[in-house]
Image (cartoon, rainbow, N blue to C red):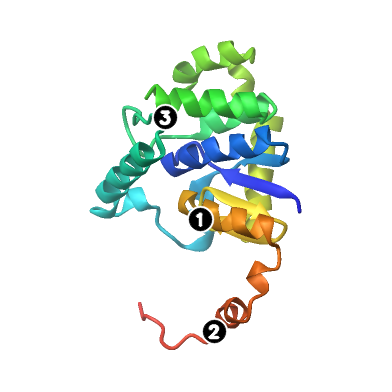
């Protein structure tokens, strides 16, 4: 089945799952990385991000740091979070959204802890990738990012990172094992109970 990985560099959980996505790629499984704008997805779905909710923001940061230690992954937060991810997303697209470019950008943000939230901050990384710094301002690059985000919304994506196996969506770094189980056994979601909960009636709805 085709695998598509929707992500935004703003997400530290995407950085953690990226290490697993690279392993999949190295094992010969074709995965297409698709950079998208998480904020646009939140707006379209009428949601807030974890970093926009006091209390949840601080817990999320501690949780992802704990996950990184558990998984043996070096993780250092950039100077501020949330940050403007558009320069890094556009640079990724200008560089072809290939494995090396995605890896270099994630590394700079989440391993080195460097800012990438402006043209000036992204310039050293652009030079390292051999991309003109002003490429992030090109109309075709901006259009491609909007198209990627629209594609994600059409697929039903509601958060990042999301790994799509065919039309099955697996949201979050902690869902990776579930995704790999379905990749190994595509019939898994067809179990009677999984089918039942997929159409489970809503018992009550919150007002306001």
Residue 147 x, y percent position in the rendering = 69, 45
Q: In the depicted view, which residue is nearer to us: 162 or 183?
A: 183
Q: Residue furthest right?
A: 1
On residue 130, which mark appears?
A: none
Which quarter of the figure has residue 169? bottom right
Q: In the depicted view, which residue is nearer to us: 5 or 186?
A: 186
Distance from disc 2 to disc 3, alpha carbons, whole Å, reads 39 Å
Q: Is residue 65 left or right of residue 90?
A: left
Distance from disc 1 to disc 2, alpha carbons, whole Å, reads 21 Å
**Can residue 169 be seen in this snapshot?**
yes
Secondary structure beneath disc 3? helix
Residue depicted at 40% across the width and 53% down the height: 49
- Label 2 near label 1: C-beta < 8 Å? no
Q: Quick one: label 2 or label 3, which is nearer the N terminus? A: 3
Residue 168 x, y percent position in the rendering = 66, 61
Q: For mark 1, does the 10 Å Cα neighbourhood hold few (<14), some (14 to 19), or many (20 or more) residues?
A: some
Q: Is residue 66 above or below residue 42?
A: above
On residue 175, which mark appears?
A: 1
Q: In the depicted view, which residue is nearer to us: 118 or 110?
A: 110
Distance from disc 1 to disc 3, alpha carbons, whole Å, reads 20 Å
On residue 200, which mark appears?
A: 2
Q: Read off the residue under disc 3.
A: 110
Secondary structure beneath disc 2? loop
Q: For mark 3, does the 10 Å Cα neighbourhood hold few (<14), some (14 to 19), or many (20 or more) residues?
A: many
Residue depicted at 52% across the width and 16% down the height: 125
């Amino acid at each position: 089945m085709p695998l598509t990985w929707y992500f935004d560099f703003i997400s530290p959980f995407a950085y953690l799952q990226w290490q697993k996505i690279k392993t999949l790629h190295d094992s010969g499984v074709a995965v297409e990385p698709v950079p998208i704008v998480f904020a646009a997805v939140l707006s379209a779905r009428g949601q807030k991000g974890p970093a926009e909710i006091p209390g949840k923001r601080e817990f999320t940061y501690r949780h992802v740091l704990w996950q990184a230690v558990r998984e043996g992954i070096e993780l250092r937060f950039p100077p501020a979070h949330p940050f403007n991810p558009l320069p890094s997303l556009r640079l990724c697209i200008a560089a072809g959204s290939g494995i090396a470019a995605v890896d270099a950008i994630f590394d700079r943000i989440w391993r080195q802890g460097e800012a990438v939230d402006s043209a000036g901050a992204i310039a050293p990384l652009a030079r390292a990738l051999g991309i003109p710094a002003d490429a992030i301002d090109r109309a075709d690059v901006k259009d491609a990012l909007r198209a990627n985000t629209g594609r994600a919304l059409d697929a039903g994506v509601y958060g990042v990172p999301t790994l799509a196996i065919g039309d099955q969506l697996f949201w979050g770094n902690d869902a990776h094992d579930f995704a790999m189980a379905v990749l190994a056994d595509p019939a898994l979601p067809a179990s009677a109970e999984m089918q039942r909960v997929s159409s489970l009636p809503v018992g009550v709805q919150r007002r306001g």
